[in-house]
Amino acid sequence: MTAAIETHQLTKRYGAARGIEELDLRVGAGVVFGFLGPNGAGKSTTIRTLLDFQRPTSGAATLLGLDSRRDSVEIRTRVGYLPGDLHLFDRMTGGEHLAWFARARGVHDEHLTGSLVERFGITMDRPVQDLSKGNRQKVGLLLAFMHAPELLILDEPTAGLDPLMQAEFEQLVRETTAAGRTVLLSSHSLSEVQQVADRVAIIRDGRLIVSDTVDRLRARAPRVMQLQFRHQVDADPFRRIPGATRVEAIGTRLDLHVHGDVAPVLEAALAQGVIDLTAHQADLDELFLAYYRDEPEPRS
């Protein structure tokens, strides 16, 4: 099956400034693909290059089997896009935006747009300059989804939305992929993405550092342990344990992450008189942060 998005050594430089470097990315059709990284990592640069808003320095990309440069006009008719820096026409209402985009696209499915307006409670009769950030974001979501595109590229889509609307957005994304369409969801928040994503890629300093399914990333996450001792704990024996990272002693308490077998940790803890412990599998947010602390990659 043709990938919804595929890049080959895609590179964008701004003189000496970092953009993206030799990005090899594949987004399968009919999935939610989480594209993660902090601000400045290269997410928006990647998206702008994919959509031909800027030309790559080198490399190539295809969207829906079409060349991102040669076929950019056709691509934009088949893609829904919500930019991270959403700009609307201040004096136009939500309804006027909808009419303008419907004319530009030659598409207006009143049933679909009416459903989106109702489920998100979108304000359609006031100038967007009078709307809150969350209500402007809802207008942006409407414009991205209004033509039932084959591919949606959404950059920080839940910015400004309250928890109820975030849950509604997640449901809309699930419905979209259930219909066989594809969503690229770009965010700096893994906790947001992991709710709906099938696969996740993490970009760091313009380079792709990991791409895997959410389940496999979760399985690689370390175990987070907190141990309580009767007396002040000596952290040095724990720091020498293979697979133990982020070891921190605070009086009679010890916190650490463990990759792999926890038996050596338990043995060291018993030797120092442990009286209590808690342990849980690290969530994907903690795994994500580990890549940005230059820690060793978790063992498979």
Image (cartoon, helix red, strand yellow):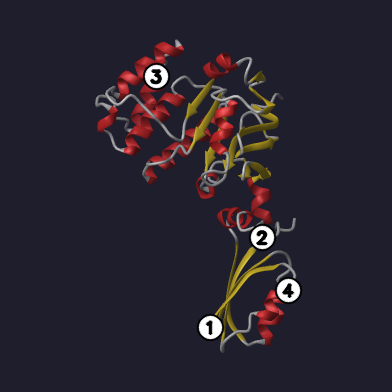
Residue at mark 3 to residue at mark 1: CA–CA distance: 62 Å
Question: For the image shown, how many numbered marks are present on the structure?
Answer: 4
User: Which of disc 2 and disc 4 is earlier in sequence?
Assistant: 4
Residue at mark 4 to residue at mark 2: CA–CA distance: 15 Å
Type of amino acid at the residue the image marks with label 4: Ile
User: Which of disc 1 and disc 3 is earlier in sequence?
Assistant: 3
Label 3 or label 4, whichever lies nearer to me, is 4
Label at residue 111: 3
Q: Which residue is mark 2?
A: 295
Q: Which residue is mark 4?
A: 241
Type of amino acid at the residue the image marks with label 3: His
User: Which of disc 1 and disc 2 is earlier in sequence?
Assistant: 1
Circle 1 — which element?
A: loop
User: Which of disc 4 and disc 3 is earlier in sequence?
Assistant: 3
Circle 4 — which element?
A: loop
Type of amino acid at the residue the image marks with label 2: Glu
Residue for point 55% across, 14% down:
73
Q: Are marks 3 and 1 in contact (CB under 8 Å)?
A: no
Q: Is residue 168 left or right of residue 50?
A: left
Q: Position of residue 199 (x, y in %)?
A: 63, 41
Q: Quadrant of residue 249?
A: bottom right
